[in-house]
Structure formats: structure tokens, C-alpha cells
Image (tube, rainbow, N blue to C red):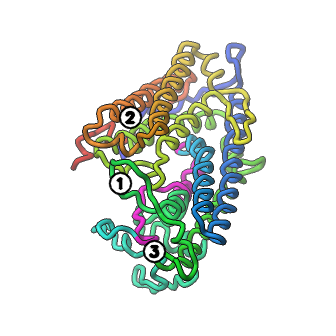
Amino acid sequence: MFRRFLAASLMTTALTATPLLAAEPAGVVKTYADIAAATYEDSLTTARALQAAVEALVAMPSEQTLTTARGAWLAARIPYQQSEAYRFGNPIVDDWEGKVNAWPLDEGLIDYVAADTATNEENALAALNVIATPKFTLSGTEIDATAITPDLISETLHEADGIEANVASGYHAIEFLLWGQDLNGTAPGAGDRPHTDYVQGEGCTGGNCDRRAAYLVAATDLLVSDLEFMAAQWAEGGEARTAVTADPQAGLMAMLTGMGSLSYGEQAGERMKLGLMLNDPEEEHDCFSDNTHNSHYYDGLGIRNVYLGSYTRVDGTTLSGPSLSELVAGADPAVDAQLKAELDATMAALAAIKDAAERGTAYDQMLAPGNKEGEALIMAAVDALVTQTASIERAVAALGLSKIEFEGSDSLDNPSAVFQ
């Protein structure tokens, strides 16, 4: 992974409040922790609603209960994607994130897939289909998967054999179980799993409906458990909150590192430009549900939340406090004004993608070769994200901080490597 470096060392002079500053670092970092707590609490609340919808689907499979479960999944993505700005700068989040949002995945590990997509030369487990396989051998050990439990998913299947594509847990495993594969390529249409894949006994489609239901329930229960863990880390006395608030200067570094890394390497690079370069719908973030436009939008919103010190909760209330914007404005008003304008420009570009998708042109269709309008929409957002990253670097310098390391992407830093 290529990285961008702002400087080589951290200045030894501590950043403290002065009459020139509109906010104090300690207050800014507290707002950051408060917004994290609220965002993960909302993620947990919506995951519990998803859990209830999944239980209803399994108890009485129908078009309506499947549609309701899908809607609950879509709603759960809104707060979670805004939490991604807490990655990269917080080790507790980074060590945990792969359990809940890892992608892309070799979905044949979990369930049936189209025959022409069931093999992967680099992953022997890509066609395992554990739902249809109650016993199998993994690294020379026989695995009894008769009972599909959260522990089986998290401890045995997830990233089995050390292969990242063996994603067995989290939002995208659940997404696959609710929608199924999207076999439309860059043509219209998302996954179209029938509700009868969950019918017990006569009428079951896809085979092993009882085990598919067990997997969906276990994966959703695991997601709720994982989010309970992270919500606790940011609550009063939680380890993540303590880590960023104990040293406000280090907390500011975490904030800016998360903003810059998500903005540049992760979103602009790996999630957007890479898929466009490859014209590959498998590289879209929410590929089964065709929800990628929303995932991109709420990632961008999460970055802006951190800078402005404000978050709108799922109940419509707003949480706000002393902000990084105020701190930067006190040090260099021009840098703050430019960064706020660029954050707004990014959100406008992401909103344009969202609007186009909601009018009927899904993100995977935008990736199609020769789709100049789709390419222009995606590249406008990529360019805006890259531009705002440069101003995040200026904010770092304005605050007297250095050695901020942002995640990179071959698609941005070394495009020729993408095709090697």
C-alpha cells in the first residue's frame, strides 16, 4: 500500500489554548469522542432493528418480510458508514473494523453462487458453500459445522486460511444473504434472492434453507455483538475514548489521520477510482444491494462531521460541540474557510452520484466502459476528495502538527501498477 507523508517528525511544542484560538484541543477531542459514541450507538440501534427484521424473515419468509429485512439493512448502513472516519487514527477501531465491514468477499464460501463465479485460483475456499457443507477440512483439520453459530463464523470461517477475501461476517455477508449475487454486471439490477430461500421444508429454493436461516441469524447476532463492543469503547470510561482524550494533541492527530486516510486512499482510491479504472462492478462497496452510492455519500459525510464537530443522529437530533474547524480557524482562518468549502464541494459531488442512482442509474452502471456521464460523476467526487485531502494537510500544518501519514492507493499513486 502506497502512503503519502506530510512530514517526518512531530513538533515537540504542545498545542495549547491561547486567546487566538476559538476552541481548546481538549474540548475538540471530547466532541470527537462524543460523536463517535453517538455514531456507534446509532449503528447498534439500527443493527438491533435489522436483527428483529431477520428474525421475522426466518420465522415467516415472504416477499414482505424479505423487503423489510433489506430495508433494515439499508437503514443500518447510514450511521455505520459515518463512523468510518474513526478508522486509521484509532488502533482499537482498525483492529476491529474487518469483522464488520470487510469487502470484497468470495461469497461462495458462504452459500451457493453461479457456477461460472464459484472458483478462485487463489482461494480454495471460494466455493466451499458452508451452508451446504456441514463438515469440511480446513488447513488439515476436520471442521464440524453442523451447528452454524456466531463462534463458527468469527473463529473458523472469517478470513479462513488467512485469506482476506474469506469474509464470513459483517454487513456484507448479511447483505449477500439478503440479496444474493448481483449477476447483472454493469447492466441494471441488483441481487434478487427469492424469499423462498428461507422457506423451511416444501417450497425451499437453493437448498439447505434451514442452514441458510441459521447462518443469517448467527451473522446478524454477531454484528450486534461486535457493535456492542465498539459502542462500549467510546462510552464514558471506554478504552477508545480514554486513548484519544488522555492526550489532546494525540487526539487531534487521530482525527486528522482518519479524515485524510479515508478521504484519500480509502474512498477516493480503493473504493472509487480503482473500480472505475477496472470497470468492475465487483469493486463497488455494496455490490449485492446496489447501495454503493449511499455508502460513498455517508463516508464523505462522516469526514465532514469530524471536522465540523457535528452529527445528526438517526432520531433527527443533532450533537455538536467545540470543533476542529474552530481550532483551525483560530490558527489560520483562510485554511479553515478553504477546507470547509472543499468539504461542501465533496458532498455536492457525492450527492450528484446519489441523486443519479436514485433516479435509476445505479453505481455499477456508472462503472460501465464507455459510460462517460457515469465516469464524470465518479471522477468529480474522486477529484474533490483528493483536493480536500490537500487542505487537510494544510490544517495539520496550521495547527503545528506533523508526521501525519495518510493511506494511499495504487489507483492514485501508481496507476500503472493496477494492471500489472
**Badge nearest the viewer, 1 or 2:** 1
Q: Is residue 190 magenta?
A: no
Q: Kindly tell me whether residue 305 is visible in this rendering.
A: yes
Q: Is residue 330 above or below residue 200?
A: above
Which is nearer the eye, 61 or 331?
A: 61
Q: Position of residue 352 (x, y in %)?
A: 46, 30
Q: Which residues are magenta?
A: 88-112
Which disc number belongs to residue 378? Answer: 2
Contact between labelled residues 3 and 2, with CB atoms less than 8 Å apart:
no
Q: Position of residue 76 (x, y in %)?
A: 62, 50
Residue found 63% across the figure and 44% down from its top: 79
Q: Residues within 10 Å of mark 2 (few under 14, many from 20)?
A: many
Q: Secondary structure at mark 1?
A: loop
Residue found 35% across the figure and 35% down from its top: 374
Contact between labelled residues 1 and 3, with CB atoms less than 8 Å apart:
no
Residue found 54% across the figure and 13% down from its top: 334
Which is nearer the eye, 32 or 17?
A: 32
Residue type indicated by callout 2: Ile
- The residue beneath circle 1 is 184
Q: Kindly tell me whether residue 410 is visible in this rendering.
A: no
Q: Position of residue 260 (x, y in %)?
A: 49, 34
Quarter where residue 54 is shown: bottom right
Q: Position of residue 367 (x, y in %)?
A: 33, 42
Residue found 66% across the figure and 50% down from its top: 43
- The residue beneath circle 3 is 206
Q: Is residue 157 left or right of residue 225?
A: left
Question: Marks 1 and 2, Cα distance to the nearest angstrom?
Answer: 20 Å
Question: Marks 3 and 1, Cα distance to the nearest angstrom?
Answer: 19 Å
Which is nearer the N-term, disc 2 or disc 3?
3
